[in-house]
Image (spheres, helix red, strand yellow):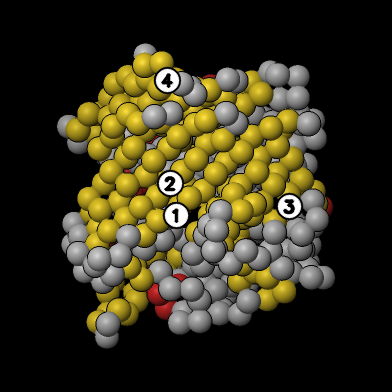
Amino acid sequence: MTAQSHGKVSKQPAGTVDGKPVDLYTLQDGKITVRILTYGGIVMSLEAPDRNGKPADIVLGFDSLDGYVKTGNKPYMGAIIGRYANRIAGGTFQLNGKTYHVPKNDGDNALHGGLMGFNKKVWTAKEIKDGVELTYVSPNGEEGFPGTLTTTVRYTLSGNELRIEYSATTDADTVLNLTNHSYFNLKGQGNGDILGHEMKINAKRYTPVNANLIPTGELAPVAGTPFDFLKSTVIGSRIDSDNEQLKLAHGYDQNWVLDGGGKKVELAAEAYEPTTGRVLEVLTDQPGIQFYTGNFLDGTVTGKGGKVYNRRYAFCLETQHYPDSPNQPKFPTTELKPGETFRSTTIYRFSAR
């Protein structure tokens, strides 16, 4: 174990995937411990204290690498998502007049990068101060995307903050949307549903979807709708309202248009769990955040410690560009060109009150 000024980083072998060795990195600082697999860049566990100082693992996942590999990790628990997080309508997009096809894996859509996205890759890793740096080179044409894309994700833990820094370069024009898909339950993973959590999202608008969960292109106001989380609101208070958008998604599974507009790292959302006092703040420089309430968890996944993950047993706050942006010219662009470097930062900040 390597002691460092602000925390400790250690690694151990976790197994192999397709003959490639996978390591598990443990980041520790104070009462917060984060474990990260080099397979999928998965946040495998995240222990944070409640108001009495008692730690609990607050992210869903499996006890070992085998759990993720054997199940295919269909819920994408804890993983880095790429090349394109969220949905691309029809699995197709145009770039420079040419049409590209990404495998459809979500009805008529491509979801989270296709069949073999970044969540199923073994990343090259090296220890850095307070954390681990992961790199993956996606070859030209992988999952239908143009350009050889080199992506680096740095996870660092300092004090009560887990920082995720993304960077990427390409050798040909391409599109890119990266996020982390951790499922949170601030009561502790597997400890019931998240409907009693309170949520605040700093967004006056959101992107409504059609029956395929693809944005219509409208940036609709949240005012007067169940999507208004400008003030801290109990998640379950309106989740089953008679609202077409909620019915289409079976709960919350929409993209909020952050008021900050993605210009600098600032507070996007805050979740609070009243029985434990745990607070999760999400800060980002991305223009959107997908708030998802685990509507498609259905009890078929048995996670850590034998806990069964039922419907709405977790929520996700995926910092991102808007879904289907390559097909939506009015949305902020997700194009990346040679000579440019994509950079983005997301911070998960933990506390209790």
Q: Is the Cβ of the residue at disc 1 closer than 8 Å to that at disc 2?
A: yes
Which numbered disc flags the more N-terminal residue, 4 or 2? 4
Residue 325: percent from the left, percent from the top? Answer: 45, 73
Mark sitting on residue 165: 2
Q: Residue at x 45, y 71 (%)?
A: 324
Cα–Cα span, label 1 and label 2:
6 Å
Q: Nearer the viewer, mark 4 or mark 3?
A: 4
Which numbered disc flags the more N-terminal residue, 4 or 3? 4
Q: Disc 3 marks which residue?
A: 200
- Badge 2 density bin: few <14, some 14–19, many ≥20, Cα 10 Å: some
Q: Secondary structure at mark 2?
A: strand
Cα–Cα span, label 4 and label 3:
35 Å
Cα–Cα span, label 3 and label 2:
23 Å
Q: Secondary structure at mark 1?
A: strand
Mark sitting on residue 344: 1
Which numbered disc flags the more N-terminal residue, 1 or 2? 2
Residue 272: quadrant of the picture:
top right
Which numbered disc flags the more N-terminal residue, 1 or 3? 3
